[in-house]
Image (cartoon, rainbow, N blue to C red):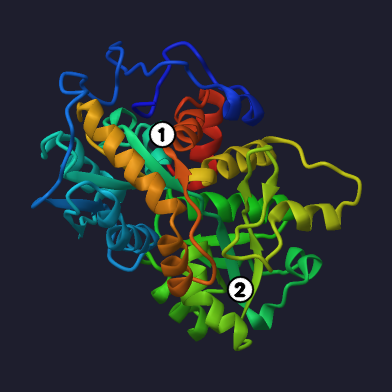
Amino acid sequence: MNGILRSPVTRVVSVLAAATVLAACSVGVNGSGSAGGSSASGTDAVTFAGKTITLVAPFAAGGSADVLARLTATQLSDFLPGKPTVVVKNMDGGGGSVGLNYVANLQPANGLTLGFFGAGMATRYIAKTAGFDDLPDQPLIGGFPQGLVQPVRAALGTDIPTLQKSSKPLRVAETSAGGTGALSATIGDGLLGIPIKQIFGFSGGGADAATSMLSGETDAAQTADTSYDQTFQPYVKSGKFNALFQTGIMNSQQQIVRSPLAPNVPTILEIYQQLHPNAQPSGELWTTYQLAANLNTSNYVLAARKGTPDNIMSTVRTAFNKMAASDGWKTFTQSKLTVPLATTDATVATKSWNAFLDSSPEQVALFKKYSGLK
């Protein structure tokens, strides 16, 4: 599987169909047979001895992409032929478009520059935001499942009926319109009937959002489960914050389940079913929630540049999979987080992103509406 695919004819009409439809071969937007690489040197042995591989995190230091990139950089070298040096380069700007352009257009297609791309970039792509046209053409190496958690100030409690009846909307700290946090906050609170006011402009990682909550300037935040684990969970344990809900992720059986990084936090669906016994959510918010949960199966992806030779892609993908399966990865990531960090291989990651990138016009309209994009 060579790249993030965009079919010119197939449209995803439901999340269940979207998650199961995957082209049998890679077809890029230019109609070529391989969106990800050239087979000219497909049989040559690959070694990265004496080389430096740069993982581009297109967001500020401290955010989820940065954390995941640094965890990967620490471990990936041991599984690549020649054991190259692997470093992280933060390139914040344009909601991820600056880093995307650097990987997709300014660096050689030789496997030495890889990108850590986030689901918020996929949202901006389907909304036709300038700077993201190259996103679907970059071949994926692997992905990282990630849910989002909404912590609230403890004084507000976690009683949903009380929050539903509040005369004041819940002030939710967000990074920017179009991000998965913005999308999930609107979907989650909307499904549960909680009035909110989204406040944009907070940096990734959640530290300034947590500070804002502590001072009472905002009431809640939407944060990736890695940031929740590192930044917000200590405040939950100390009693200053409560974890109201998480978005959850979709497993291989198309079931929405809790993120392993937030095992004690109920999903939006769990809370909804508690509030409405024997009822199944429906409507456009529910459809959007399902699509977002499917994308969360590979919320962040590691990608190369289009045109990277097949033998290099195969070598890096194999190394990524071996790293993810190793005891060293499990031990190391658990030492930094509370549980070993889960991953998805290139096939699963590509499938998840394809389903989202091939969203129908109706689905695109929903994502724009609920993520704050114009």
Give the residue at x 48% y 38%.
368
Q: Report the residue that reaches farthest toward the bottom.
A: 238
Task: Assess disc 2: are there few (<14), some (14-19) or many (≥20) residues with their C-alpha within 10 Å of its C-alpha.
Answer: many
Question: Is residue 261 among the parts visible in the rendering?
Answer: yes
Q: Which mark is residue 167?
A: none
> Looking at the picture, how far across and down is residue 92, in whole percent?
24, 56
Residue 212, above or below 57: below
Image-quadrant location for residue 197: bottom right
Q: Which residue is mark 2?
A: 152
> Looking at the picture, how far across and down is residue 17, in whole percent?
63, 24
> Looking at the picture, how far across and down is residue 135, in whole percent?
31, 34
Q: Report the residue that reaches farthest toward the left.
A: 50
Image-quadrant location for residue 128: top left
Give the residue at x 87% y 44%.
279
SS at mark 2? strand
Is 251 in front, or is 168?
251
Q: Which mark is residue 127?
A: 1
Amino acid type, residue under disc 2 in the picture: Val
Q: Are marks 2 and 1 in contact (CB under 8 Å)?
A: no
User: Would residue 27 be found to the left or right of residue 94 on screen?
Assistant: right
Is 281 in front, or is 23?
23
